Amino acid sequence: MASCNNIPGHFFSNKSSIERRNDSLASLFDPQIAQQKAIKLDTFFKSLQKNTGFNGTVLVAQYGKVIYKQAFGVANKFTNDQLSTRTTFQLASVSKQFTAVSILQLVEKGKLSLEDRVEQHIPGFPYDSSITVRSLLTHKSGLPDYTFALDKYYDKKAPLTNAKVVQMMNEIKPGIDYRPNREFHYNNTNYMLLAYIVERLSGKDFRSYVKENIFIPAGMTESFVYDPQHPEWLKKAATGYVPKGGGSVVANFDHLDGVTGDKGIYSTVEDMFLWDQALNNEKVVKLSSLEQAFTPQHTKPKVLTTNYGLGWRMKQLENGEWLTYHTGWWHGFKNYYLHNPKDNSAIIILGNNANQSLSRINIVQSILYPEKSKLFIKGETIPPSSNSGGN
């Protein structure tokens, strides 16, 4: 007897629950409504470019389908090369979610637990034994920021590495900022250490690990983790600019650019959409693991509604829903990525001119979700530019 899986009426028989879920969401896509939203988005971003100097690329998707993508401005002001949706940008702190997923992959493989003490994986780690992998992921470690705490000890003529920073922390042991696991304090040291743990457990440098376990499975062919030893990788990348004297100047690289995990990934809006799809399709990590990542981890009153998961920022709307997103800025790059796992939607904005263009991200959210526009009145703003490692 022939298998019923070959009968047309049983088209979904061989599909996983994830595939059926995504197909169900895709069926909600309405081309006419999508076109209306695309027109509004185009009008908004053209106005943003004209009035605030927005310079960057945009991709907005809903129900797993792209409804708008566009590039505005130049990749390099000297050569006047125009941006495209395949231009690579430094993701800055948006890189942290890739580090978090790398850790979650190792958890799924049984190589570590989120409750493991950091000292189990970093020999000579001189800090409190209550600091766990989860403490790092949720920014509750109390550790000092390596970009400042060891500043006077760095050889600023040579790129740092994670191993070098860890060695210096072990030897110098700069003081902690607060007792571990007592409060939330966003800190790049946490994700630098997580990347180092990935290296130790995988036996690969972090750049190779991410390429093999995230970029290749997700199909992200244009993405890479920056390596100061290979400046040629930046040949097609956008140049970052920072404000100066009423204009803008090129943001210079420095010794901190050799450190990975907290920043350092270069990608395009198109590759970031592939990342978004990979998360929804379980190509890089299980949805059950992502549910932990998208769960608010902090209970203190001051961070109840503006929270953090595992590698993602979280913002609670007045109706109780959570926005899952991350911002990032570093060396003139300023970015925003909203990932909505409930309807396979995404807002991806990558900019290379650090100004206040993205302070009205609430408008983009309102266009994507007009039925919730009143909830976005206060908006999700990206704070003023910082050159201290991203946000």
Image (tube, grey):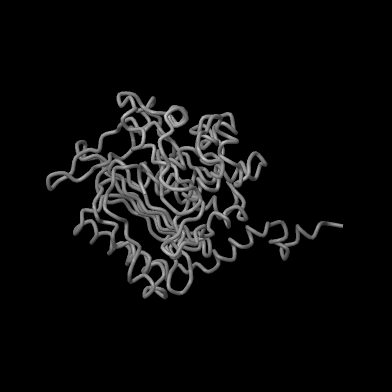
Give percent across and percent down for residue 334. 31, 49
Q: Nearer the viewer, residue 340 or 306?
A: 306
Q: Is residue 348 above or below residue 233?
A: below
Query: At 43% across and 63% down in the image, what residue appears?
Result: 315
Q: Is residue 41 above or below residue 117?
A: below
Q: Can residue 66 be seen here? A: no
Q: Nearer the viewer, residue 124 or 162?
A: 124
Query: At 33% across and 50% down in the image, what residue appears?
Result: 57
Query: In which quadrant is the N terminus drawn?
Result: bottom right
Q: Nearer the viewer, residue 96 or 52?
A: 96
Give percent across and percent down for residue 43. 27, 64
Query: At 60% across and 46% down in the image, what residue appears?
Result: 114
Q: Nearer the viewer, residue 303 or 89?
A: 303
| Left or right: where 5 falls relative to 42 | right
Q: Can residue 48 be seen here? A: yes
Give percent across and percent down for residue 196. 51, 34
| Left or right: where 19 falls relative to 91 | right
